[in-house]
Image (cartoon, rainbow, N blue to C red):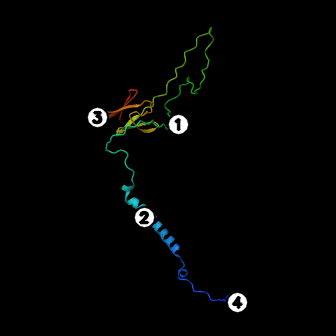
């Protein structure tokens, strides 16, 4: 007698075992093939129908009234993103370090010489900006640090507020709270 001899009869295989796959296996295979086909088809659908997936344009000719909401402040850009001005050289007699102390250098007692006149510290140069576009009660302005969309009441890069948006001689201008007028260039 050998190990290959069976002591009892082996039942015949069921029909599902003969084919090798159960219903669950077939369902998983079919869903995988369907998902792969959709993944291959979708980029072509987007490519052939760009109007359904495109970004709407920023400026449209349609005009509408804006709601009366308070203006938001202009967001400032970080100093790391600002452009260096190499044109302006520091004045040698001015101390570039800002401190909270006032030196007594050059000041003598009540019986001595009068203190010398202080050096007049100039203010930082004004941050000029230019008017780019006006639409829907808003203006797009640009300065050295970036572009901003502002409306009446918004704080501008020169720390004034936008007073009015006007059309003068067919050109849009903005008037600031300081009285400055900026035309589109």
Crowding near the residue tagged with mark 4, few <14, some 14–19, many ≥20 C-alpha atoms within 10 Å: few
Q: Nearer the viewer, mark 2 or mark 1?
A: 2
Image side of residue 130 versus residue 117, left or right: left
Name the spot of residue 47 as percent of width and height, x first.
40, 59
Crowding near the residue tagged with mark 2, few <14, some 14–19, many ≥20 C-alpha atoms within 10 Å: few
Image side of residue 111 versus residue 51, left or right: right
Name the spot of residue 87 as percent of width and height, x first.
49, 31
The image quadrant of residue 64 is top left
For the residues labelled 4 and 1, the Cα–Cα distance comes to 89 Å
For the residues labelled 3 and 4, the Cα–Cα distance comes to 109 Å
Q: Which residue was labeled with disc 4?
A: 2
For the residues labelled 3 and 2, the Cα–Cα distance comes to 52 Å
Q: Which residue was labeled with disc 1?
A: 79
Name the spot of residue 153 as percent of width and height, x first.
40, 33
Image side of residue 78 versus residue 111, left or right: left
For the residues labelled 2 and 1, the Cα–Cα distance comes to 47 Å
The image quadrant of residue 72 is top left
């Amino acid at each position: 007698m050998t190990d290959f001899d069976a002591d009892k009869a082996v039942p015949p295989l069921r029909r599902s075992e003969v084919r090798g796959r159960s219903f669950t296996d077939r369902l998983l295979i079919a869903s995988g093939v369907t998902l792969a086909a959709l993944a291959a088809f979708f980029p072509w659908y987007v490519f052939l129908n760009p109007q359904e997936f495109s970004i709407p344009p920023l400026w449209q000719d349609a005009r509408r009234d804006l709601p009366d909401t308070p203006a938001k402040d202009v967001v400032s850009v970080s100093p790391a993103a600002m452009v260096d001005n190499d044109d302006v050289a520091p004045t040698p007699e001015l101390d570039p370090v800002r401190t909270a102390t006032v030196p007594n250098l050059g000041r003598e007692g009540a019986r001595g010489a009068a203190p010398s006149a202080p050096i007049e510290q100039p203010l930082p140069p004004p941050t000029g900006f230019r008017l780019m576009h006006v639409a829907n009660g808003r203006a797009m302005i640009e300065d050295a640090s970036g572009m901003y969309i502002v409306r009446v009441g918004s704080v501008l890069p020169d720390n004034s507020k936008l007073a009015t948006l006007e059309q003068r001689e067919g050109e849009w201008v903005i008037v600031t709270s300081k009285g400055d007028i900026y035309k589109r260039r």
